[in-house]
């Protein structure tokens, strides 16, 4: 698929980009090459390809789920305007 100068100008306008006149032929060539590559990829047979969530087959390293800090709720709630039963009380904002 080949795009023309008018196509690049329209894309630049939609993206709110100002392109220099001297750079225009390069943009036309590069975008045409990108669209040609996408057209080639449309013809690839992917019927037996399993979908992937990520291209790398890796597992996430996880830390042990253990408590490492002491409970400081009472200390933090000392400066709160209002608390009750260990919870912060805030004004109602939705009626």
Image (spheres, rainbow, N blue to C red):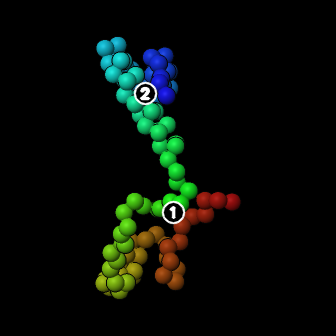
* Vertical order, 86 against 91 (above or below): below
Query: Residue 22: where, in percent of width, then height?
Result: 31, 14
Q: Secondary structure at mark 2?
A: helix
Instruction: Give the quadrant of residue 25.
Output: top left
Residue 5's disc number: none
Mark 2 or mark 1: name the one nearer the start of the chain.
2
Q: Using residue 90 as the reference point, say whether residue 79 is left or right of it.
A: left
**Residue 26 appears in the rendering:** yes
Residue drawn where x is 34% and y is 77% of the image = 62
Query: Residue 53: where, in percent of width, then height?
Result: 47, 62
Q: Are there few (<14), some (14-19), or many (20+) residues within 10 Å of tag 2? A: some
Q: Secondary structure at mark 1?
A: loop
Q: Are there few (<14), some (14-19), or many (20+) residues within 10 Å of tag 1? A: few
Q: Nearer the viewer, residue 37 or 87?
A: 37
Q: Using residue 21 as the reference point, say whether residue 89 is left or right of it.
A: right
**Residue 78 appears in the rendering:** no
Query: Residue 56: where, in percent of width, then height?
Result: 36, 63
Residue drawn where x is 64% and y is 59% of the image = 94
Residue drawn where x is 53% and y is 71% of the image = 89
Q: Nearer the viewer, residue 41 or 77?
A: 41
- Which residue ends up furthest to the right in the rendered image? 95
Name the residue carrying label 2: 32
The quarter of the image holding the C terminus is bottom right
Q: Nearer the viewer, residue 37 or 88?
A: 37
Instruction: Give the quadrant of residue 55.
Output: bottom left
Residue 50's disc number: 1
Q: Are marks 2 and 1 in contact (CB under 8 Å)?
A: no
* Vertical order, 44 against 24 (above or below): below
């Amino acid at each position: 698929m080949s795009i023309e100068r008018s196509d690049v100008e329209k894309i630049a306008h939609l993206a709110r980009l100002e392109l220099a006149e001297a750079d225009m032929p390069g943009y036309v060539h590069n975008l045409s090459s990108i669209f040609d590559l996408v057209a080639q990829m449309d013809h690839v047979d992917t019927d037996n390809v399993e979908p992937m969530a990520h291209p790398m087959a890796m597992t996430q390293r996880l830390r042990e789920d253990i408590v490492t800090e002491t409970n400081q709720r009472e200390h933090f709630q000392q400066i709160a305007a209002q608390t009750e039963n260990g919870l912060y009380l805030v004004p109602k904002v939705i009626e």
